[in-house]
Amino acid sequence: MTDATPPCAFEWTDDGVMKPINSRRADAYYTVGERYLMAPISERSYASHRHEFAWLREAWKSLPEALADQYPTTEHLRKRALIDAGFYDESITDAGTAAAAIRVAAAFRAIDDFSLVIVRGPYVIRRTAKSQSRRAMGGAEFQRSKTAIMEVVAGMLGVDPGELPKQEAA
């Protein structure tokens, strides 16, 4: 099994056997007689996932005009909130000079309009939001990122994170 191997679901049986839920899938990734380390991964609920996206949609609709231009879609808002909350991958490129860094930054922005590109002298810092896919984030990390996103976006709107859902229901 490699880091790229997707997790397979197993069930601990009464007779002390860890049995795969889908044996064909397990056969594709595991070899009979080999030993593997196992660790529990907390699954996340679909309800929590749907709640995040519904909440973001309502928050996006509530953005003031000045911010609406910066976030043309809910996906732009979500990814920027992830970055602002610290859920990002970062690369730093030394372009050699400040002028070259500006050109490199422009190229990075053209490649991915969801990333945050910062120029500091000759350096270009590129931050991309971490994926919230089920494969990339377990339940606990997803919940931390969801809470952080809600706090960042609520801060943009000048409301308490618990206030927006109340506004949505009204």
Image (cartoon, rainbow, N blue to C red):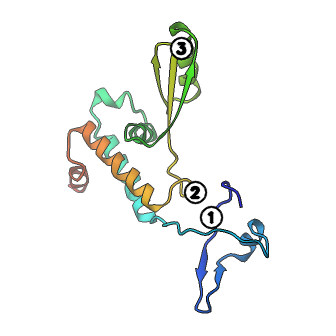
- For label 1, the residue is 7
Q: CA distance from mark 1 to mark 2?
A: 8 Å
Q: Viewed as shown, does residue 4 lie left or right of 157? A: right
Q: Is residue 11 above or below residue 27?
A: below
Label 1 or label 3, whichever comes before in sequence order: 1
Badge 3 amino acid: Ala
Q: Residues within 10 Å of mark 2 (few under 14, many from 20)?
A: few
Residue 139 image offset from top left, x and y in percent: 46, 62
The answer to which of 39 and 89 lies nearer the viewer is 39
Residue 91 coordinates in the image, percent (x, y): 55, 30
Q: Residue, x 37% and y 58% (percent of image)?
A: 51
Mark 1 and mark 3: span between their CA atoms? 40 Å
* Separation of marks 3 and 2 at Cα, in angstroms: 34 Å
Query: Which residue carries the number 3 mark?
Result: 101
Check disc 2 and give the amino acid type.
Arg
Q: Residue at x 26, y 54 (%)?
A: 165
Whether 12 is drawn above or below 139: the answer is below
